Amino acid sequence: MHEISLVEGLFQQLRDLAAENNTTRITTVTMEIGPLCGVVLDSFQFGFDILSADDEMLRGSKLIVKIPEVQYRCSDCGHVETVAGPKPDGCPKCGDLLLIPSGGEDLMLLQVEME
Amino acid sequence: MCDTCGCPSPSDHSHDHNHDHSHGHSQTKTVDVHASLFAANDALARANREHFDEIGAVALNLISSPGSGKTTLLEHTIEALKGEINIGVIEGDIETERDADRIRAKGVPVVQLTTGGACHLDAAMTHKGFHRLQKEPGGDKIDLLFIENVGNLVCPSTFDLGEHERVVFVSVPEGPDKPSKYPKAFTSSQTFVITKTDLLPYFDFPVEEARGDALRLNPNLRTMELASPTGEGMEKWLDYLRELVAAMKARKNL
């Protein structure tokens, strides 16, 4: 729901970064989007596409998204399952349903390529 | 310097160097950033929390769908704790002063933040709101600050406001499936309150199912059920608030 405003915040950060590096053109933006950070990937990409199309500095730039793994610790047997995709339904070892996630909550700007 | 390979960037090229790789990339520059997009909000939230600690005010961030009964619960809470705990309220809504008017009528300091369309409060709005609140009559001695977030079970859960605890509310008419459908509001909260339990006879709301789903997501959740107009379950809620305030006072007096 607030992906567009997050992209606006990102663009402000990119403008500052471009100014620091004396560049007016950004070609590639690499982000890490944690599965638990509350950001919908498709909406973020959509926001990036429509806002970059309107932006001199970012027009035609590419968004690369990396999705970090999340570790789920079983609250019963302590088994830790590391998952890149959706949350597992239950512990693969004992079947318990209480899994405590760790990681995957951040939205990071990793790297920027500029000309 | 080019950050990728260490070769000089175009601006400091003298063209007398002798390395042998291709210069096809000499126009591009790669910068490693590793900065969280939430970092600015989180830093401000930490500053807010430190400020609340300093003045000894417990801050609670109240999250729910629109219409779960947060404002009504606050009205009853203010009545019940009058003369015992100094309460202040920050009301977040997209438009109107209505909620603030209702709280003001109860005689406690309140400010209304209208986000003008934004789906959540953030740490910056909270910071400004709290400074406005401190200028209201009674705003200089707050023990317990309620921050009533914009009615929304999705976005507010991503933004730390600097609260000490987060409370998520689900009312009986909404149905018991909210914890499963909106997990982040429950995994990021410390307390889960089911409201409007006086309506249980009229709705299909298995309390155990809602509570069980929420605890599956977050085994550390404190849970309670109440109906503020009838007073049912209110003592547990009020005791929870009293304990938070007493713990803060004890920390301050150490």
Image (cartoon, rainbow, N blue to C red):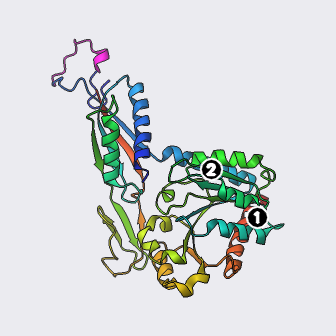
Q: What residue type is labelled 1?
A: Ala
**Quadrant of the image occupied by residue A80:** bottom left
Residue B250: image tag: 1
Quadrant position of the N terminus of chain B in the picture: top left
Query: Which of these two is toward me, B153 or B72?
Result: B72
The residue carrying pointer 1 sits among few (fewer than 14), some (14 to 19) or many (20 or more) residues within 10 Å by Cα, namely: few
Residue A62, image x, y percentages: 26, 39
Query: Which of these two is toward me, B20 or B251?
Result: B251
Left or right of B172 on screen, residue B73: right
Q: In this view, does B201 lie above or below A86?
A: below
Magenta part of the protein: which range? Answer: B9-21
Q: Is residue B20 magenta?
A: yes
Left or right of B47 on screen, residue B242: right
Q: Does the magenta stretch include residue A48?
A: no
**Residue at x 38% of width, y 68% of height:** A72
Residue A12: image tag: none
Left or right of B187 on screen, residue B98: right
